[in-house]
Amino acid sequence: MTLNRGVHRHAHVSPRLLAGLAVGALAALVGASAAVAAPIAVDPEPSPSPSATPEPTGTVDDVSAVLDTYGPFVVAGGQSLSANVTLTNDAVDPVPEVAVRLSITDSPIESREALADFFDDPSVAPMRVMKSVAAGTPEVDEDDEPLNTGTLRPSSPTQVRVAASSKDLALPDGTAGVYGVTASFTVGSSTVFINSMAVTWLDADIATLPVTAIATIAGAPSRAASLLAGADVEGVTFAVDPTSLSAAGPRDVLTGRETYLLPATNPDVASLAHAGDTDLIEFALDDARSRIWTPIAERPWLALSAVADQSVASWTNANGAVATLFDDEHATKSPTLDEVDGWVPAVVGVETADDETAPIIVPDAGLSTLVANFRPADPAGPSRIVAESALLAFDGDGTKGVVVSPGLDWNVAGDAPSANLSALMSAPWVTHRSLTEALADPRQGEETIPRVQGAQEDVPVDNITALSARLAGLERLAETLNNPNAILQPDGRTLLGAVSSASRGNEQQQATAYEVAITDVGTTLDSVGIVRSSDINLIATSGEVPITIHNDLAFDSTVTVVMRSTSPNLQVRDRPVITVPAGEEATAMVPVEAVSSANVSLSVWLVNADGDPVSEAQDFTMRVRADWGNAATAVFTGLLVLVLIGGVIRTIRRGRKDTRTGPGKPAEGAKIVDEEEIDD
């Protein structure tokens, strides 16, 4: 259905649409009032820039005005349209002849492009004044007849409500269409523009519009909490990186919702896919799933990719992703998708090498951008999102839907649901379609999606290979700790930071992040190793070789010392296991046995409990002198034999002397002399 085509001039309006109109009107007015009454809280992290179109405000002759509320965004026969405006007179004296008015386009707006043109410049469309109301103290003419103007007192703000009745609207019965509306004020003959908005006239049945809304939640915990609050709207599907949620953070929003898992730190899936990586994405998924305190960890994972091509779709499918969500925010190459029967498919099926169908989810770029960033603090901003969805419904058949994904750079304020998203999901013609339902019906475009595109924006393949090698080394070293995640998680995320989606296409950022990751993780990998020593002497057939190990980590590390001899003249008898305290050194004794004398080259390194190396090998030379030990033993043995023989001889001589003198007393006058004297 297109606009103002006389759709059943006296057509019946369905009860669902009437109920939706009432709810939508109430929500628009209440939500707008709340937006004015409460100050806007700013998220501590930088938010993306809002729409390039400034939030309008007018000023002339020291009088300024701002729109406070506007609604409802959808109007049917018998309903009115109203706006509240606050005017301020900054002059010293009162300002007379002031009025506020609402104007509407003479004809309905026929397309989304025309609607965008109207919001960029309302003067492109002929308009008529629906309602004009005096501002301030009402004025009268010389006959005391009331005028449609008033006088503003200085300094004090003045609130004015302008309500256009169904009669003032004067829209054709039995039709549906989107109209442009402006709020302005006049001072004498001068007219000052305040704001542009839209209203959807719904006095006929129209096709429903299935909408799949996907909120991606990632980033720092404070940012993730804001995104969760902004997406707390009925019918929204969540894709969440659990590492962005603190254990004590707000997670009630996810209760009972359709949720999917995002890899930790939101890596550049296109770069990983084009490089054929499996290690980095496996770590990112394992890290996300390690958050056992959240049920999200058990959900299927969804890939965010800035490139939609066959290689990415096949790679994500092979690595277990339920689908690939095209990330329009960081896209450098949009997918080429021709319309099928006048409609761009929201889920495109891509045939993989193994004859499977890998779905690529393609959000409606225009609608997604508007939900994310169009005048987030403007009470009239959501009227455009509602109007855009109406234009889609007019051209639909009730079965062809759209996907809306505001992305990670979504402009959310405070901890309240997004007014733009709320307005879209509560539009009377919008039905909520889950992602599971959308994925069940992938469609083919009229042209085949390219096999590879956007590779020039990728992280270099060599960088990804080096990062993957660093990750492998980190995993090996982590196994020497009682808690491997103590170093694996933080350093692994450092590596993932070098393949971040945020730096896609920016060579300088990619190069800087790569150097930081390689350097930082390299320092960790060098934290446990063997202290280089001088050559060692072994002058025996067996002994123990001292190996000093340093541990610069903040955690105890248990390693096995492996020594390899390059010569059969020296054999290594064992691999000692030693725990090196955090920040200290320890010495392990490696038992060896010499076969013969030689100069032997040795290589020593450390391994974890699985036998995987965790340090670089240190090479040194051992001077083995096994025969020196044998000779020394022989000499020592000979000396012992000589001492023994000497002792025996002395004993024998003493025995002979005793035999000659016999027992009894010595003869009188005999002289007793020492044996030493006799010897002399």
Image (spheres, rainbow, N blue to C red):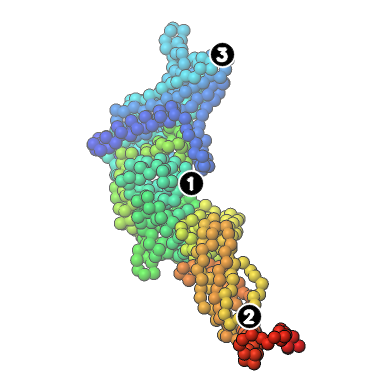
- As drawn, is 223 to the left or to the right of 545? left
Locate residue 349: give its quadrant: bottom left
> For the point 39% across and 69% down, which residue is it?
353
Distance from Cα at disc 2 to Cα at disc 1 = 62 Å
> For the point 66% across and 72% down, which residue is it?
534
Residue kind at label 2, given as amino acid type: Ile
Q: What number is the disc on residue 539?
A: 2
Residue kind at label 3, given as amino acid type: Asp
Residue toward you, 623 or 178: 623
Question: Which x, y percent locates residue 232?
Answer: 37, 41
* Circle 3 residue: 93
- 301 to 60, vertically: above or below: below
Q: Is residue 64 among what the camera can see?
A: yes
Locate residue 584: give its quadrant: bottom right
Q: Is residue 172 among what the camera can see?
A: no
Question: Could you tell me which quadrant the N terminus lies in?
Answer: top left
Q: Secondary structure at mark 2?
A: loop
Residue kind at label 1, given as amino acid type: Ala
Q: Give the class, few, some or many, for how many residues have Cα within 10 Å of label 3's Cα (few <14, many ≥20).
A: few
Q: What number is the disc on residue 220?
A: 1
Residue toward you, 403 or 638: 638
> For the point 31% across and 36% down, which residue is it?
202
Q: What number is the disc on residue 228?
A: none
